[in-house]
Image: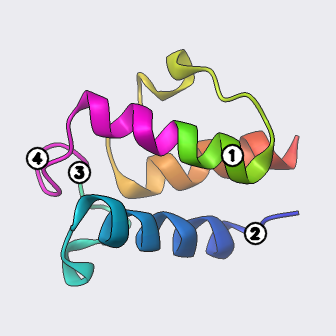
């Protein structure tokens, strides 16, 4: 359904549009909190946005181990591919 590239692109666009993260800061190995200055509330907003798009319930607990942009892409991709 969604390729990893699609998920990455959508995540990239959300981070820029919703959280005003500079596009050049968004790299696969960028850490969400330390490098992109996101907090736990931002993470919840991101989960809700992806739930709307995918139509799948994304358990917040799934995101406890997420630290980088690539971690998010991997988690979302796994959920939409299952």
- Magenta segment includes 44: yes
Q: Closer to the observer: label 1 or label 3? A: 1
- Label 3 secondary element: loop
**Residue at x 54%, y 75% (from the top left corner):** 9
For the residues labelled 4 and 2, the Cα–Cα distance comes to 27 Å
Q: Is residue 74 above or below residue 62?
A: below
The residue where tag 4 is placed is: 34
In the picture provided, is 74 more to the left or to the right than 38?
Answer: right
Residue hosting label 3 = 31
- Which disc, if any, is residue 52? 1
Q: CA distance from mark 3 to mark 2?
A: 22 Å
Report how far apart the C-alphas of labels 1 and 3 lie in the structure.
Answer: 24 Å
Q: Quadrant of residue 67?
A: top left
Tags 1 and 3 touching, CB below 8 Å: no
Q: Residue at x 17, y 43 (%)?
A: 33
Please provide the residue range marked out in magenta.
32-47
């Amino acid at each position: 359904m969604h390729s990893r590239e699609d998920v990455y692109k959508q995540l990239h666009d959300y981070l820029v549009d919703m959280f005003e993260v500079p596009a050049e800061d968004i790299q696969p190995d960028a850490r969400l909190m330390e490098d992109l200055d996101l907090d736990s509330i931002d993470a919840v907003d991101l989960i809700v946005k992806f739930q709307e798009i995918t139509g799948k319930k994304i358990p917040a607990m799934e995101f406890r181990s997420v630290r980088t942009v690539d971690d998010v892409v991997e988690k979302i991709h796994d959920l939409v591919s299952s």
